[in-house]
Image: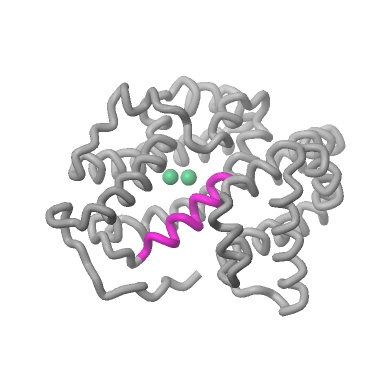
């Protein structure tokens, strides 16, 4: 992905003098991000110890530990940005409900493959969010955005590697387990994009979802080559889960992409 052109020439170098609406929106966005990623800093039992114990190989363990370290540092960024805006990320902050349920699904993971699926979907979405921040008008955020974006791209690729290694090692058993898990992880991944994104697509601005769909399809094709027909399996699963509206968006994006050739996008 190339860096996006700044949407506006307006720049805010510090928290001082921010318009009230802008500040409210900034705090809301950073709070969601901080609530999610501070789990890595404040709940190592769930976000480090448990997955490290499940990681089946030394390579998986080492890569997961490096991923966790990135996420703790990301959490420190959001804490500092929020502190400058008058919000403390403390026990009360962390007691608020998790804003996106896929992070609770991660904590309920029963095997290593689910950690791979989490990063495959959730960190991929994080990469797209980080991309949106590059060049943003709030300069303290813009200064770290490119690094966060690049690291989230790396995390999505990491999820893919976890899955690929698992399938290579476990054969049919791994394939069967992947198909079972996709019943919940695939719709949950798509569900990270809310109604506002879908509305934008209806208005002709669906680039966000197009990126997502194109990248997922690319990866599905690669995994399918390894003997797993993910697309067919999830077509059945998503009906069962009842995420038809989201699935339709996915289908529309896929059809657009086929009609237009390969969409300009990401290769995470
Ligand atoms: Fe992160
Ligand atoms: Fe991440």
Along the line of sight, the residue nearer the viewer: 180 or 85 = 85
- The answer to whether 208 appears left or right of 164 in the picture is left
Which quadrant holds residue 209? bottom right
Front residue (pair 19, 64): 19
* Residue at the outermost bottom position: 260
Report if residue 70 is visible in the image. no
Question: Is residue 90 something one can see in this rendering?
Answer: yes
Image coordinates of residue 214 in percent, x first then y, are 67, 64
In this picture the colour scheme is one colour
The residue drawn where x is 46% and y is 20% is 45
Residue 112: percent from left, percent from top: 65, 31
Find residue 204 and report its horizontal and vertical position in percent: 60, 72
Which residues make up the magenta segment?
Answer: 122-134
Q: Quadrant of residue 122?
A: top right
Tell me: residue 168, above or below residue 109.
Answer: below
**Residue 57 lies in magenta, yes or no?**
no
Residue at 63% x, 27% y: name it.
109
| Viewer-proximal residue among 177 and 171 | 177
Q: Magenta stretch: dominant SS?
A: helix
Q: Is residue 36 left or right of residue 238?
A: left
Image-based side of 27 in relation to 182, left or right: left
């Amino acid at each position: 992905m190339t860096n996006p052109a700044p949407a506006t020439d307006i720049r805010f170098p510090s928290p001082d003098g921010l318009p009230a609406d802008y500040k409210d929106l900034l705090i809301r966005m950073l709070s969601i991000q901080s609530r999610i990623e501070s789990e890595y800093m404040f709940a190592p039992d769930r976000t480090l110890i448990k997955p490290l114990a499940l990681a089946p190989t030394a390579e998986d363990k080492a890569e997961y530990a490096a991923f966790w370290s990135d996420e703790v540092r990301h959490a420190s960024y959001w804490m500092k940005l929020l502190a400058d805006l008058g919000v403390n990320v403390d026990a009360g902050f962390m007691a608020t409900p998790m804003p996106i349920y896929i992070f609770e699904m991660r904590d309920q993971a029963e095997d290593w493959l689910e950690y791979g699926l989490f990063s495959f979907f959730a960190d991929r979405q994080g990469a797209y969010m980080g991309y949106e921040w590059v060049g943003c008008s709030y300069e303290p955020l813009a200064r770290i955005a490119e690094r966060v974006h690049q690291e989230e791209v790396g995390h999505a690729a990491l999820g893919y590697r976890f899955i690929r290694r698992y399938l290579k090692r476990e054969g049919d058993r791994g394939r069967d387990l992947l198909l079972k898990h996709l019943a919940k992880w695939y719709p949950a991944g798509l569900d990270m994009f809310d109604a506002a994104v879908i509305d934008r697509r209806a208005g002709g601005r669906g680039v966000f979802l197009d990126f997502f769909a194109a990248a997922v399809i690319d990866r599905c094709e690669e995994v399918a080559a390894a003997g797993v027909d993910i697309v067919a399996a999830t077509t059945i699963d998503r009906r069962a889960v009842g995420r038809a509206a989201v699935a339709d968006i996915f289908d529309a994006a896929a059809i657009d992409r086929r009609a237009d050739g390969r969409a300009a996008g990401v290769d995470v």
